[in-house]
Image: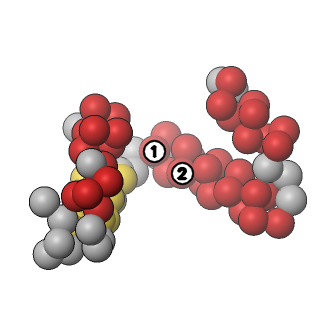
């Protein structure tokens, strides 16, 4: 595991944190089995400049689709 995975496993052990760990593990298994990611954006996310943080992290072999609402630019 990497440093972020180790941090999450140590600090997110209970209640909603444990659900985050379970979801992350399921997502890794999904990708390892050849699955792809679906990203949905809604509302005024254009003002959050989401493209700056999301854009460079998109792997074309992983992202299968991206949906958006009318307010997203």
- Residue in view at x 76 percent, y 57 percent: 17
Nearer to us in this view, 7 or 73 = 73
Above or below: residue 2 compared with residue 40: above
- Residue in view at x 64 percent, y 48 percent: 25
Residue picked out by circle 1: 31
Q: Position of residue 46 (x, y in %)?
A: 22, 58
The answer to whether residue 22 is visible is no
Kind of element beneath mark 1:
helix
Nearer to us in this view, 32 or 38 = 38
Residue picked out by circle 2: 27
| Side of 21 relative to 38 (left or right) | right
Crowd band around label 1 with a 10 angstrom C-alpha radius: few (<14), some (14–19), many (20+): few
Q: Quadrant of residue 57?
A: top left
Work out how far the residue at label 1 is from the one at label 2, CA to CA, in angstroms: 6 Å
Above or below: residue 53 compared with residue 47: above
Kind of element beneath mark 2:
helix
| Side of 63 relative to 30 (left or right) | left
Instruction: Point out the image quarter for the C terminus.
Output: bottom left
Instruction: Point out the image quarter for the N terminus.
Output: top right
Above or below: residue 11 compared with residue 13: above
Above or below: residue 62 compared with residue 15: above
Is label 1 in contact with label 2 (beta carbons under 8 Å)? yes
Q: Position of residue 32 (x, y in %)?
A: 49, 40
Q: Position of residue 55 (x, y in %)?
A: 25, 39
């Amino acid at each position: 595991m990497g440093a972020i995975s180790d941090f999450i496993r140590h600090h997110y052990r209970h209640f909603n944190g444990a659900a985050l760990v379970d979801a992350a593990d399921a997502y890794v298994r999904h990708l390892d089995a050849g699955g792809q990611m679906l990203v949905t954006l809604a509302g005024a996310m254009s003002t959050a400049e989401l493209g700056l943080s999301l854009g460079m992290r998109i792997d074309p072999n992983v992202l299968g689709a991206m949906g958006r609402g009318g307010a997203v630019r």
